[in-house]
Image (cartoon, helix red, strand yellow):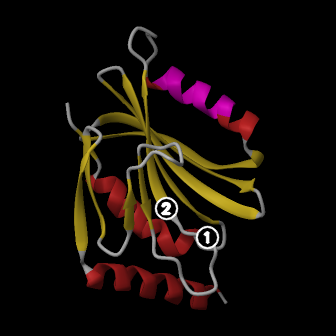
Amino acid sequence: MKCFVLALMCVTNVAFAQSGKLSAYDGNNITLSYPSDWRVDESGKYGPKLFLFSPVKEGDAFSENVNLVTEDIKGVGIGIDKYYEVSIENIKKVMTNYKHVSSSKQKDANGEYYTLEYTCDQGQNHINLIQRFWIVNEVAYVLTAVSEQTQVENYRKTYAEIAKTFRIKK
């Protein structure tokens, strides 16, 4: 069974790498690249300023996605460590069946950031979230990848590729 899962993950990753069709996004003070067959929504009707939705597969009611939330924290006087700490406390309060998977502090072209992965329930959906938190020029940027728990490994490489191209305009 482990070999089958590993083979499936490799096929999924190769399929993404071979398609190679990426689109560029430039807006909301950021740039990034995403698979060209994903749908962009900047309407704000779901809350976040940006949503990137994966194509919905036949028989699947959930569209895996990546979204961006920004928060102006000018004058608040908190750094990335405190912002991350407060964010986790708020997440634990509002998410049903929150379960921590992993977290780490890293650095990229945007500066220091935290990565948080957790699972929770959203209605009838059992979801996995991978979030990255940055603060640049007193604005917090939270990039979140959301998938069904059973699908996270099928999307993990795609999420990482999107996050790798994520740049905040300074």
**Residue 138: horizontal and vertical position, in percent?**
35, 20
Relative horizontal placement of residue 4, taking residue 131 as reference (left or right): right
Residue type of the residue flagged with mark 1: Phe
Q: Which of 81 and 133 is in front in this view?
A: 133
Mark 1: give few (<14), some (14-19) or many (20+) Cα within 10 Å.
Answer: some
Residue 141 drawn at (x, y percent): 40, 35
Q: x, y percentage for residue 114?
A: 46, 38
Residue 65 numbered mark, or none: 2
Magenta segment includes 83? yes
Mark 2 burial class by Cα count in 10 Å: few <14, some 14-19, many 20+: many
| Residue at 52% from the left image edge and 87% from the top image edge | 8
- CB atoms at circles 2 and 1 under 8 Å apart? no
Q: Quadrant of the C terminus?
A: top left
* Mark 2 → mark 1, Cα distance in angstroms: 9 Å
Q: Residue 63, located in which quarter of the rendered image? A: bottom right
Q: Is residue 123 left or right of residue 151?
A: right
Q: Mark 1 points at which residue?
A: 62
Give the residue type at disc 2: Asn
Residue found 33% across the figure and 63% down from its top: 161
SS at mark 2 in the image: strand
Q: In which quarter of the image is residue 40?
A: bottom left
Q: Which residue is drawn at 39% across and 40% down?
A: 106
Decide: is 13 above or below 31. below
Residue 40, numbered label: none
Q: Is 53 left, or right, of 40 in this rendering?
A: right
User: Residue at point 63% right, 33% down?
Assistant: 88
Segment colored magenta: 81-90
The percent coordinates of residue 155 (x first, y second) are 48, 70
Is residue 97 located in the magenta-colored stretch of the structure?
A: no
